[in-house]
Image (cartoon, rainbow, N blue to C red):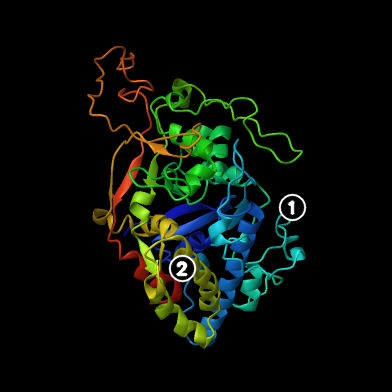
C-alpha cells in the first residue's frame, strides 16, 4: 500500500483554487496529507485570498456539523487527520507591476460575494489582519458560517510563507514533500533565493501554469499565473537546469517598475550560487499548462445536478459553492463563445494538479509526462511576457563530444538551446485518466458520492 503524498499547497484563491483545496481536503487520507496552505497574491489581493481560505474552513466546519446532524458521513477525512498550517506571502510580484484576475474572480476572489466578515475577526489569527472583503459574507449569509467563531481546522502561522515552506522541507526527509503551486510562483521563488538547496529537497513541484502550444488566457501567449510573476517562474524553472545561470532572467532596466505608491520598488533577487556550489541535485518541476488543463471542465448542468438537491436540504457547502460558481458560469458566458445554459463550462485548471497528487501513485499508468523539456519563460517582452518558449527548430542537438562538454557556442543558437548542459529540464503533463473523468471525481469527493 502506498503512503499518502505529503503536500504544501501554494495558492491564490480564486474560484478554481477553492475547488482544488476542497478536493484536497476532502480526499482520502491514504492518498494525500496537507501540511501547509501557503497564500500568495494573484487572482485578487493577498489579504482577500487569505480571507477566502479562512472562510472556506468555516464553511467546511459548518458542513461537517450539518452532515452529522443529517446522519451522513462527515467527509473531509484528509483534513480531519491532519490539520494544516496557513501562512501568508507577499502582496505583489518580485519586480513587475501587480496584475490580478479580479475581472473574472471578482474583487474578493469568489465572484463578488463579500459582504461577510468584520475586520476584527482576523486580528487574533494573522499579523497584520486582513482587510474586509466581500466573499466571506457569502460564507455567513449563504453557508451560515460565522468567521467570528474560532475554528480548530487549521493553525495560523505568523511566519511568512516562503520561510514556512523552507522550514517544513528542512524538517522532513528529502524527496518526501511535494508542492502544489496553483498561483503565481512568488513564494517559491523567494524560497529558492533564500535557500535553494533546501527547496530542492522537495520531491516535486506541481505547477499549474503556462501555455506551451496553446493560446494564453491573459494575453494571446501567456497564462495568468506565469504572467502575474514571470520573473518568479523563470527563476524557479532555472533550478531544473544543469546550469541555472543559463536561463536566469536578465536584470530589468532601471525605471522599468511601474509604481503608483510612495513605496520604493522591490529590489531584484540575487543570483543563485554557481552550479558547482549548488551540487548535483536539481529541482523536479511537473508542469500542468493550459494545454492539458483546459479540456478538463465542469459543466453548469452537472454542477447543479449535484449541488442543488444538497443546497435545498440546507448544506452550507453546497449553498456557498453555488453562490460563487453561479458567478463563474455567468462570467464564462460573457467572455467566451460557445458557452450557454447548462453546457457552460469552467475549466478545472487548479483541481487537475490536486487530482494528480491524489491519484498519481495509484493510477500511475494513466498519467503521462514529457521528460526534461527545455521550457523557458519570457520576462522582458512587451507583448510576450509570461510566454512559455520552446525550441521548435528542426536542429541537431549538440553532444558531449562537441566543444567542452557540449558547452561551446555554435552559430545560430543564441541562448544555447541546443546544448545538453544548458536550458531548463521540466516534465510536462500530456496525458490524464480522461478529460471527462475529473468533474465527477471532484463533485463526488467534495459533496459525497
Mark 2 burial class by Cα count in 10 Å: few <14, some 14-19, many 20+: many
Q: Quadrant of residue 243?
A: top left
Q: Is residue 45 in sight in this rendering?
A: yes
Of 275 and 444, which appears nearest the observer?
Answer: 444
Name the residue carrying label 2.
26
* Along the viewing direction, whichever of 165 and 19 lies nearer the viewer: 19
Secondary element type, mark 2: helix
Give the residue number, with chain letter if any, for mark 1: 128
Up the image or down, 429 lies above or below 105; here it is above
- Per the model, the C-alpha gap separating discs 2 and 1 is 30 Å
Q: Quadrant of residue 300?
A: bottom left
Closer to the observer: label 2 or label 1? 1
Pointer 1 local density, CA inside 10 Å: few below 14, some 14–19, many at least 20: few
Q: Position of residue 335 (x, y in %)?
A: 47, 60
**Which image quadrant is residue 302 in?**
bottom left
- Where is residue 324? Give x, y as percent: 54, 69
* First in sequence: mark 2 vs mark 1: 2
Amino acid at each position: 500500500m502506498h503512503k499518502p503524498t505529503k503536500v504544501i499547497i501554494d495558492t491564490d484563491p480564486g474560484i478554481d483554487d477553492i475547488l482544488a483545496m476542497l478536493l484536497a481536503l476532502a480526499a482520502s487520507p491514504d492518498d494525500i496529507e496537507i501540511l501547509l496552505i501557503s497564500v500568495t497574491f494573484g487572482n485578487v489581493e493577498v489579504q482577500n485570498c487569505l480571507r477566502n481560505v479562512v472562510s472556506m474552513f468555516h464553511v467546511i466546519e459548518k458542513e461537517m456539523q450539518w452532515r452529522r446532524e443529517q446522519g451522513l458521513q462527515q467527509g473531509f477525512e484528509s483534513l480531519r487527520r491532519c490539520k494544516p498550517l496557513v501562512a501568508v506571502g507577499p502582496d505583489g510580484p518580485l519586480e513587475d507591476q501587480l496584475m490580478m484576475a479580479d475581472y473574472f474572480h471578482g474583487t474578493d476572489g469568489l465572484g463578488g460575494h463579500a459582504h461577510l466578515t468584520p475586520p476584527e475577526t482576523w486580528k487574533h489569527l494573522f499579523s497584520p489582519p486582513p482587510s474586509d472583503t466581500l466573499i466571506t459574507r457569502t460564507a455567513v449569509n449563504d453557508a451560515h458560517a460565522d468567521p467570528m467563531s474560532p475554528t480548530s481546522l487549521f493553525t495560523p502561522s505568523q511566519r511568512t510563507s516562503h520561510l514556512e515552506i523552507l522550514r517544513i522541507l528542512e524538517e522532513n526527509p528529502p524527496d518526501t514533500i511535494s508542492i502544489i503551486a496553483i498561483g503565481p510562483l512568488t513564494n517559491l521563488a523567494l524560497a529558492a533565493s533564500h535557500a535553494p538547496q533546501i527547496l530542492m529537497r522537495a520531491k516535486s513541484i506541481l505547477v499549474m501554469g503556462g501555455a506551451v502550444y496553446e493560446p494564453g488566457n491573459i494575453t494571446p501567449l501567456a497564462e495568468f499565473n506565469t504572467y502575474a510573476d514571470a520573473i518568479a517562474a523563470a527563476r524557479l524553472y532555472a533550478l531544473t537546469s544543469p546550469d541555472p545561470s543559463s536561463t536566469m532572467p536578465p536584470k530589468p532596466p532601471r525605471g522599468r517598475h511601474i509604481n503608483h505608491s510612495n513605496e520604493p520598488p522591490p529590489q531584484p533577487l540575487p543570483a543563485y550560487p554557481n552550479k558547482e556550489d549548488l551540487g548535483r541535485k536539481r529541482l523536479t518541476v511537473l508542469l500542468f499548462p493550459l494545454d492539458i488543463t483546459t479540456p478538463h471542465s465542469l459543466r453548469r448542468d452537472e454542477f447543479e445536478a449535484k449541488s442543488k438537491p444538497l443546497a435545498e436540504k440546507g448544506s452550507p457547502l453546497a449553498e456557498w459553492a453555488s453562490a460563487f460558481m453561479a458567478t463563474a458560469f455567468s462570467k464564462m458566458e460573457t467572455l467566451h463563445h460557445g458557452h450557454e445554459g447548462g453546457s457552460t463550462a469552467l475549466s478545472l485548471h487548479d483541481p487537475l494538479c490536486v487530482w494528480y497528487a491524489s491519484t498519481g501513485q495509484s493510477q500511475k499508468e494513466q498519467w503521462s509526462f514529457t521528460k526534461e523539456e527545455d521550457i523557458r519563460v519570457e520576462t522582458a517582452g512587451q507583448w510576450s511576457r509570461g510566454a512559455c518558449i520552446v525550441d521548435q527548430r528542426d536542429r541537431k542537438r549538440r553532444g558531449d563530444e562537441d566543444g567542452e562538454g557540449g558547452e561551446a557556442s555554435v552559430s545560430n543558437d543564441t541562448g544555447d538551446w541546443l546544448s545538453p548542459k544548458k536550458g531548463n529540464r521540466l516534465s510536462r503533463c500530456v496525458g490524464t485518466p480522461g478529460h471527462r473523468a475529473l468533474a465527477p471525481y471532484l463533485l463526488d469527493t467534495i459533496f459525497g458520492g
